[in-house]
């Protein structure tokens, strides 16, 4: 049972890497330039919108 769980987790994390983009300074969105109250850039939508809002609020203070 433990081995099956590890295999499933490995496959799931591998699948995430296939769909994630490759980002560098030239192609990542600068959200702070569009809105001075935004700091979190989340192009692959890994974080949910509520988490992004909380992090942006923490960084604003």
Image (cartoon, helix red, strand yellow):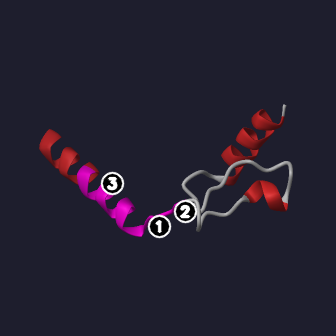
Main SS, magenta region, reads helix
Q: Is residue 35 above or below residue 54?
A: below
Residue at the extreme top: 61
Residue depicted at x 25% and y 58%: 11
Q: Quadrant of the N terminus?
A: top left
Q: Is residue 57 above or below residue 50?
A: above
Disc with the residue nearer the chain's start (3 vs 1): 3
Question: Would residue 1 be visible to someone looking at this image?
Answer: no
Q: Position of residue 55 (x, y in %)?
A: 71, 40
Marks 2 & 1, CB-CB < 8 Å contact: yes
- The residue where tag 3 is placed is 13
Q: Residues within 10 Å of mark 2 (few under 14, many from 20)?
A: few
> Is 15 one of the magenta-colored residues?
yes
Disc with the residue nearer the chain's start (2 vs 1): 1
Question: Would residue 41 be visible to someone looking at this image?
Answer: yes
Circle 1 SS class = loop
State which region is magenta: 10-24
Front residue of 13/5: it is 13
Kindly report the distance in space between the C-alpha atoms of the residues bearing marks 2 and 1.
7 Å
Circle 3 SS class = helix
Disc with the residue nearer the chain's start (2 vs 3): 3
- Circle nearer the viewer, 2 or 3: 2
- The residue where tag 1 is placed is 21
- The residue where tag 2 is placed is 44
Marks 2 & 3, CB-CB < 8 Å contact: no
Circle 2 SS class = loop
Q: Is residue 42 above or below residue 21?
A: above
Q: Position of residue 45 (x, y in %)?
A: 58, 60
């Amino acid at each position: 049972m433990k081995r099956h769980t590890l295999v499933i987790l490995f496959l799931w994390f591998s699948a995430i890497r296939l769909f994630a983009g490759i980002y560098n300074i030239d192609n990542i969105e600068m959200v702070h330039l569009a809105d001075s109250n935004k700091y979190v850039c989340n192009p692959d939508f890994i974080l949910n919108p509520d988490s992004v809002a909380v992090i942006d609020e923490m960084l604003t203070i």
